[in-house]
Image (cartoon, rainbow, N blue to C red):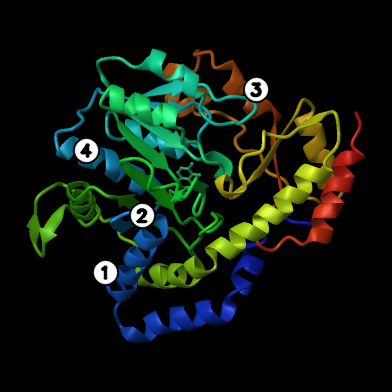
């Protein structure tokens, strides 16, 4: 592959000296869980996002699971309650609800933003609705004052899935600080990625933060005392140390992604290819660069033959998956159209402008 979709090896190599030093420091410390690196990362990340609390956990799926489980333990939600989510999200958002016995109410996205259609939310609110979970998919800010106002009007929690949008802003505020709580993933390929799994919950709600912390550590309030039937879902010290290094460069890396994205937006000109509407500079950190094309599969094969790596996010929407066979007959035409037409172009902190120019030239020369 001449131009890989994303070379994690090169991403890590960008900061190799500092990362190796940080890992080595943990290795020789003899302390591998719930130590100084975690404490430092939780403080650094809460400061970065702009919330009072950050609780590290094992991965992004768990972060979302713990938010909803904590609301259940605190008596704010109960199994059977409904949560509104975008139908085109990554399956983890949906799994976090069904894992807790909550009912996902799937709302269509808009084709020009690929984010939840805020005008379709109110019609889905029932007496059982307890939350709206927005997903800043592809790195785009999905928050809107309209959604926040609906949550206030109907007394719903506003939860953010910020797994793809670390560092993104809505005006001055970071995504992950806009709602009542947010789940973050540090999966290696994310904008802020560890060298393995990792996740975190951010919130200004002290009770929620305390409950999440207990749930992710066996449900334990202090050593050998168990308040809840929790699980072992901790962020380890090596990952926290790596994240402490990489967090320092996150804004810089996101700016680099924005530069590549600006170039794609300016240069891609093929009537068969549609780009999502642009947002203000601060409101998209381009975790991915999605395009839509009627001949997506042909385009992907054509680019692959030229040595250009692409991925589809996501080829099968959650409601069409075997694990959710009860929804397989539900009609969500926009979500299905996106699944059939979406293609993610190479983007990240290591692709060069020359490589981006090759991608553009190839796309612009694509005919059917
Ligand atoms: C990656 C991702 C998650 C889950 O994160 P993991 O760390 O892989 O468990 C959740 N939601 C979205 C939108 C994601 O992209």
Q: Residues within 10 Å of mark 4 (few under 14, many from 20)?
A: some
Which residue was labeled with disc 1? 34
Which residue was labeled with disc 3? 337
Distance of label 1 from label 2 (alpha carbons): 14 Å
Regarding residue 2, the answer to whether it shows in the image is no
First of labels 4, 3 by sequence position: 4
Which residue was labeled with disc 2? 200
- Name the quadrant of the C terminus: top right
Position of residue 121 measured from the top left corner of the image (x, y, whole percent)? 42, 20
Res 348 quadrant in image:
bottom right
SS of the residue at dot 3?
helix
Which residue was labeled with disc 4? 71
Please report contact status of discs 4 and 1: CB closer than 8 Å, yes or no. Answer: no
SS of the residue at dot 2?
strand
First of labels 4, 1 by sequence position: 1
Q: Residues within 10 Å of mark 2 (few under 14, many from 20)?
A: many
- Residue at the location (40% across, 40% down)? 160
């Amino acid at each position: 592959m001449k131009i890989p979709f994303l070379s994690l090896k090169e991403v890590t190599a960008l900061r190799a000296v500092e990362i190796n030093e940080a890992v080595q420091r943990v290795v020789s410390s003899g302390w591998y869980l719930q130590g100084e690196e975690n404490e430092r990362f939780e403080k650094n990340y809460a400061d970065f996002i702009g919330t009072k609390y950050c609780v590290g956990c094992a991965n992004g799926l768990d972060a979302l699971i713990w938010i909803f489980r904590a609301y259940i333990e605190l008596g704010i939600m109960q199994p059977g309650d409904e949560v509104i989510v975008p139908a085109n999200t990554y399956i983890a958002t949906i799994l976090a609800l069904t894992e807790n016995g909550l009912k996902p109410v799937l709302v269509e996205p808009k084709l020009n933003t690929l984010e939840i259609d805020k005008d379709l939310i109110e019609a889905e609110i029932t007496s059982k609705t307890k939350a709206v979970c927005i997903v800043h998919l592809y790195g785009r800010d999905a928050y809107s004052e309209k959604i926040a106002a609906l949550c206030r009007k109907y007394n719903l929690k506003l939860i953010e899935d910020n797994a793809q949008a670390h560092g993104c802003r809505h005006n001055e505020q970071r995504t992950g600080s806009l709602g009542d709580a947010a789940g973050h993933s540090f999966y290696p390929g994310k904008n802020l990625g560890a060298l393995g799994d990792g996740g975190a919950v951010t919130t200004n709600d002290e009770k929620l933060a305390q409950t999440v912390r207990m749930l992710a550590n066996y449900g334990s309030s202090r050593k050998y005392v168990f308040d809840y039937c929790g699980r072992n879902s901790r962020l380890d010290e090596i990952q926290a140390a790596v994240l402490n290094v990489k967090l320092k460069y996150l804004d810089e890396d996101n700016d680099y992604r924005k530069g590549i994205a600006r170039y794609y937006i300016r240069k891609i000109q093929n009537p068969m290819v549609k780009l999502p509407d642009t947002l203000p500079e601060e409101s998209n950190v381009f975790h991915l660069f999605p395009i839509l094309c009627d001949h997506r599969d042909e385009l992907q094969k054509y680019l692959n033959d030229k040595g250009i790596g692409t991925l589809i996010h996501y080829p099968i929407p959650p409601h069409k998956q075997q694990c959710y066979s009860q929804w397989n007959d539900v009609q969500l035409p926009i979500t299905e159209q996106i699944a059939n037409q979406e293609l993610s172009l190479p983007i990240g902190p290591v692709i060069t402008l020359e490589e981006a120019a090759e991608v553009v030239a190839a796309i612009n020369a694509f005919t059917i």
